[in-house]
Image: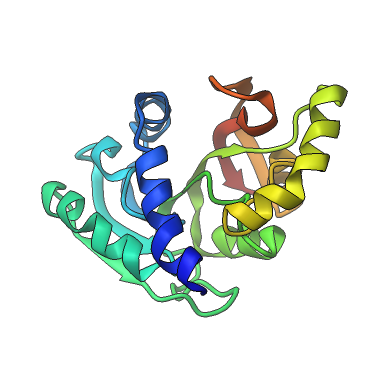
Amino acid sequence: MGFYEDQILPRGIDWGMSSERFSRLRKQYLEGVSGRVLEVGFGSGLNLPHYSHRVSHLYALDPSQLGRRLAAQRIQRVPFPVEFVEPEGPRIALPDRSVDAVVTTWTVCTIADPVAALKEIRRVLKPEGRYTFLEHGLSPDRRVARLQNLWNPIQKWAFGGCHVNREIDRLILNSGFKMLDFKNFYMEGPKVLTYTYGGVASPQ
């Protein structure tokens, strides 16, 4: 990583995504997560306060070392152990069918090969496991989608490879999942950035 992506961007994301509008959604989507959990895109641990006591162990996967340091105080406040999983390229360093739940929040937008990553998520989930996601992506509104496609190169450059024009539901379904619960909506803010995909999926 360069200096900007390594030292500046994680602090900006920690500040920008800790606002109330993000916290409300985190609480809504994460309260049902339980058991042994893998969070892909752990960042600075902004999800930690929103997990319930039913989480028994959290595996945290993120390449940012600064994010880990920013998360230190949040980790101390939760009642379950947090164990960092080291990135191994596209592979998640956990056994097959080893976790009860996987969580991604505003993460799939930045993964270089999202289908490969989602297939890894499916691999580590137990057959009855749940994948909870909260992501932003391509709007079905053609005017907004055109603007998203125009804006996307700038977004990628400024925000560490983030894409605003991915069809998150299609990516999930094409990676071997079925939807159990799914909602689409705009968050507050510019529509180019805020079309949101939220839901729960399970391995097929």
> Which of the pair 68/30 is nearer the observer?
68
**Badge count:** 0
In the image, taking residue 123 as reference, residue 69 lies left or right, namely left
In the image, taking residue 148 as reference, residue 66 lies left or right, namely left
Name, please, the residue furthest toward the bottom: 88
Tell me the residue at 58%/59% (across/down).
Answer: 160
In the image, taking residue 184 as reference, residue 54 lies left or right, namely left
Q: Position of residue 119 (x, y in %)?
A: 64, 61
Tell me the residue at 57%/53% (across/down).
Answer: 159
Q: Quadrant of residue 187?
A: top right
Tell me the residue at 19%/39% (across/down).
Answer: 53
> Against 2, is 103 above or below?
above
> Which of the pair 167/97 is nearer the observer?
167
In the image, taking residue 196 as reference, residue 21 lies left or right, namely left
> Which of the pair 42/203 is nearer the observer?
42
Q: Position of residue 103 (x, y in %)?
A: 45, 48
Q: Quadrant of residue 49?
A: top left
Q: Is residue 40 visible?
A: no
Q: Position of residue 55 (x, y in %)?
A: 26, 46
Tell me the residue at 51%/73% (across/down).
Answer: 2
Q: Is residue 120 visible?
A: yes
> Against 81, is 27 above or below?
above
Q: Position of residue 73 (x, y in %)?
A: 15, 53
